[in-house]
Image (spheres, coloured by chain):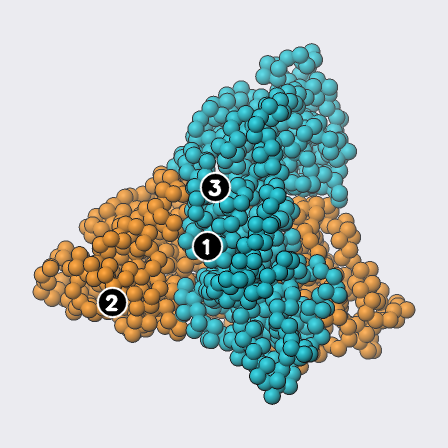
Chain colours: A cyan, B orange
Amino acid sequence: MLTRNAPTSQRPPQDLPEVLHDDMANALRALAMDAVEQAKSGHPGMPMGMADVATALFSRFVKIDPTRPDWYDRDRVVLSAGHGSMLLYAVNHLLGYADMGTDQLRRFRQLGAVTAGHPEHGHTLGVETTTGPLGQGLATAVGMALAERMLNARFGDDLVDHYTYVIAGDGCLMEGISHEAIDLAGHLKLGKLILLWDDNGISIDGRTTLSTSTDQLARFEAAGWDVMRVDGHAYHAVTDAIAEARGTERPTLIACRTTIGFGAPTKAGTEGAHGAPLGPDEIAGARARLGWSHPPFEVPDDVREAWAHTAARGRTAREAWERRLSGSGRRAAFEAAMEGELPADFDEKLDAYKRELSQSAPKVATRKASEMALGVINAETELTVGGSADLTHSNLTYTKGLMPVTPGNFAGRYLHYGIREHAMAAVMNGLALHRGTIPYGGTFLVFSDYARGAMRLSALMGQRVVYVLTHDSIGLGEDGPTHQPVEHLAMLRATPNLHVFRPADAVETLEAWQLALHAERTPSVLALSRQNLPTFRTTHSEENLTGYGAYVARKPERRRDVTLLATGSEVELAFKAADMLALRGVDAAVVSMPCWELFEKQSADYRRAVLGTAPRVAVEAAARFGWDRWIGERGRFVGMEGFGASAPAADLYRYFNITPEAVVAAACDLITCA
Amino acid sequence: MLTRNAPTSQRPPQDLPEVLHDDMANALRALAMDAVEQAKSGHPGMPMGMADVATALFSRFVKIDPTRPDWYDRDRVVLSAGHGSMLLYAVNHLLGYADMGTDQLRRFRQLGAVTAGHPEHGHTLGVETTTGPLGQGLATAVGMALAERMLNARFGDDLVDHYTYVIAGDGCLMEGISHEAIDLAGHLKLGKLILLWDDNGISIDGRTTLSTSTDQLARFEAAGWDVMRVDGHAYHAVTDAIAEARGTERPTLIACRTTIGFGAPTKAGTEGAHGAPLGPDEIAGARARLGWSHPPFEVPDDVREAWAHTAARGRTAREAWERRLSGSGRRAAFEAAMEGELPADFDEKLDAYKRELSQSAPKVATRKASEMALGVINAETELTVGGSADLTHSNLTYTKGLMPVTPGNFAGRYLHYGIREHAMAAVMNGLALHRGTIPYGGTFLVFSDYARGAMRLSALMGQRVVYVLTHDSIGLGEDGPTHQPVEHLAMLRATPNLHVFRPADAVETLEAWQLALHAERTPSVLALSRQNLPTFRTTHSEENLTGYGAYVARKPERRRDVTLLATGSEVELAFKAADMLALRGVDAAVVSMPCWELFEKQSADYRRAVLGTAPRVAVEAAARFGWDRWIGERGRFVGMEGFGASAPAADLYRYFNITPEAVVAAACDLITCA
């Protein structure tokens, strides 16, 4: 048995005797194995393996104040290996986060507990981002580190100067998103990003040598990172490495050689420690080996006091920062940025521009209309940060005067994300989570496939991220079926807490942008056309009609014989069909449905009034999937039945029979036409 | 102007004078720029830049016979940079593929032409895989190279001995999937995989230095590849490099320094050459610079003859191979494998096992039922090749006796794909495209997000790939919302040409496997439960009822008062609800709907009979999106309205109100209950 030292509360934690470092780490190990045992579910191996690294990181470096979890200038610590959630919960418990009492550790993975299976941002204090899907935390942290540098460039060291630390496992580094993320971080020289890799050589199936032979250090070096390797169970080696990493101009990988399930007598170093409770015998053996004689969930005072140092150090730092903020001439601007406040006259300016659009009625692609809207938006607010996954001139995400962010120079507002859709989405999540900007980024709608993992997290975390997804149908033409979305609108509409806008003209596009920028807890997709579309909203409306999700865009002359439902580029077809139907004595209403999710939120009365009781025909150059909700059992759908093809857009619309004539034919199947 | 040499048909192409190599390449350049100009759409820069490399590759090395495009032992050449499709079409034109006449080059990117915007497998001869979404070709090629080695291990050098060449651009190497693919290829030591990187330093937004600083050679070396760098416009340097690469035991990256749009007087070396027609002046200037005086689409005889050598060499090789095949004692087995033929008594064996299951009526998770089915399947046929993205013991994809494939040893049938869902899907596409195996691979259903890009290509190409996607709902429990699929069934069901099976018990699971293995032109998803489910199919049926997509699983006693629709784990809930309704005097039918796509294909009469005319309630632990198709306007849905949560599964079902009681309540809202 180890003997305990005298209370250490007067000494800074870096001077703690080695034995107390060990016990600080052992406290994390014990809480993790006990909580997993209690839950009969979870991952003890990673917290036990990384307990020493976490102790070194928090005891010496991390600048956070658990009493102010949202302090803007805190360090960000991201647990990319989210299955090791008990590591973070144990740390946060010992740091004294208000929500993380022992009761919550005892209720690990139970309904309503803050100790969810994987860390969930917004659900639990001190969780910077939701992790679990591997690699996401790392890529999101790149966005946070980028946000830090961009806001530092704007507001200076006094207000913004913190580190971003990531704890990642083998899985994070095997996922493709890690490549995109580390390339971008290395390129941009995000020197304040430090990655602690839990290099334990074990994954779920067994030893990592089953599936990888990569030299990770060489790989990160190739991507422009500084790299080090340390014994992850040697406190001083880890602290020295972190101290060195903090001083360099490039991001740093610290490969921490660890033993998964450190302390477990038979399961340590094996996949048996990874994802299941250790069992009472193994836990008893681990307690003996670690010299940890305390009952489950109990931590002795001296260890608690040692952990309290980090919280105290953070509080001191936060108070000093608040004094600097109070004395800063940039306080108001800084706080407005961090709160994400749009300028007071923002909506007025947008409304004035909408009036112009209604008058000039441009015939432009909605991607072009988006560029025009962004021209106004980016001039009115400094919050927006644009970018594209190497399709700037196709997505039209750049506006005049935006400077690009370049390696080591973070004063710009435009990001060349490279051909990295997944990292772009995750980096935008990181930018939004950090706060201080509103990120938007572009790619083709079909390549939302590549970004899905991170887009889902935008929705799950409720972050204000705007996806500018152009070339939204077969209307993109010659590039063919690999580039033509068919099922993507359905995929995105099925995702909870995501607004999918498919505006039909320049006015609706502006309205969609306005809604997206105001949706502080919901990400938005703008699905935009490549091809030109006429402006049909030629009468100015102060109301944002897109905000209703759907509305009657063309009222019937007398009675409503049939209702034509459409979105985006197909609203034009519906108008033409309505004109053709009029010649055949049929009075058609046209309903534009730019955002199904917002329409769902309207009153039942409103929805009934818009949809009407007449037979319905929907037209959208996409899969039918989901449309039955609106057209009902006897409704008709004009759209895609399979994948697209390579040809000029007009030929494709004819070939796939998505035409005014097809809409008329469908309508006349339902009602009597002259 | 260059002078022409005498006809060279008697000389092997490696002895062609340098000037003819240049003109072989110039022919590709001219055809590419002329076709793009004619189409007013496309990408001339890449074909012009890589023309010399393609000439070196095909003239000296590639073993294909254009008269037998599907010859099993041909080399596979994959154009991962699919936007450079005209490079491949020009090559295939000059090699004499039957479908690639000049008329097709003139109709580049037009409706119905084989010269689609991006190469489409199955649409055009000599296109090994559909490319365009960047990185896919590279990862798919890893699967092809793996198939070659696995079949070589089984059938020997006489029958299987060919190379896989990939032409990839900067975009392919920036995408995350490239990391997963090259790691796996390096690990497995796929020495016959050779990657020719079009290292032109240009992407769509401008110079690649806008967004990347990675040292690609160092990166590939870190992943276990051999690497070389050559001048991509120096024929002999390229041929020497390829010759060397063919001799090594590791996959090889050859970085080919090229000038995008080589020859174009003002646009060469700039993004202006990438993705738009060059225009008449630039084309005229390029013709002058290249010394190519021939009219559009015309290629002089000597150049055609030089290209014909490759075809002739391939024909000779193919004929020699056919003689070896004729003399081989393994011919029947080899051909059966390559044709993907299941054993004659396969269905009989499966049927016998189904009878057993109906009698024993095990209460097992459908993932376990899948493992049991695979136990029979993998014993009955050698075609299946299993694997998992590091979730073997969760997906239950391994069966007794399967040996793993290990680095340099390809005799096994099980793949440890690592934590690489996207590459797993693409590698399975490559295995299927190569022919000789039926690949299946596992991950959690929620992580289909990570694999989406490649899964879509499985569907678009119509490949027999089976996705074993377990933990298919909140039923996975404690791992929480990041691991609980909600919208994924909708996402997959909305995808054309994909069968999404969600079997409800062990019998349906076996039936789903049977259907998946017989679906030669359609990939399948098996969405499987973590939690145990009772077998309700306790009466043996020789017919595969899952093949109807939906069927009445519980007939009403007398009349049908209400119809309960369900899939997978919720069929049990529907049965319980029906029992409870019976106590309240309501006669309910239960319809199991394991595969919507197959149900859609049944006759309208059958569908009407199954769905009935009584009010309907659907229950599925997933998003409602798509269900309105089946429940109609007055139907009810019991399921998820948002994301899940972390808790034991039973608690979650109660919390989200997905219970027999909720189904009963929904039914009694529609009809009169006692």
Which residue is at a point 43% across and 51% down the rendered structure image?
Answer: A392
- The chain containing the residue under callout 1 comes to A
Give the structural element (helix, strand or loop) at label 1.
Answer: helix
Q: CA distance from mark 2 to mark 3?
A: 48 Å
Q: Quadrant of the C terminus of chain B?
A: bottom right
Q: Amino acid at mark 3?
A: Arg
Q: Are marks 2 and 3 on the same chain?
A: no
Q: Which residue is mark 2?
A: B94
Q: Which residue is mark 3?
A: A413
Q: Residues within 10 Å of mark 3 (few under 14, many from 20)?
A: many
* Residue contact at pointers 3 and 1, CB within 8 angstroms: no
Residue B151 in sight in this render = no
Q: Amino acid at mark 2?
A: Leu
Q: CA distance from mark 2 to mark 1?
A: 36 Å
Foreground of the two, A601 or B472: A601
Q: Which residue is mark 1?
A: A395
Tell me where residue B508 appears, x and y as whole percent.
66, 65
Tell me where residue A243 appears, x and y as whole percent.
50, 22
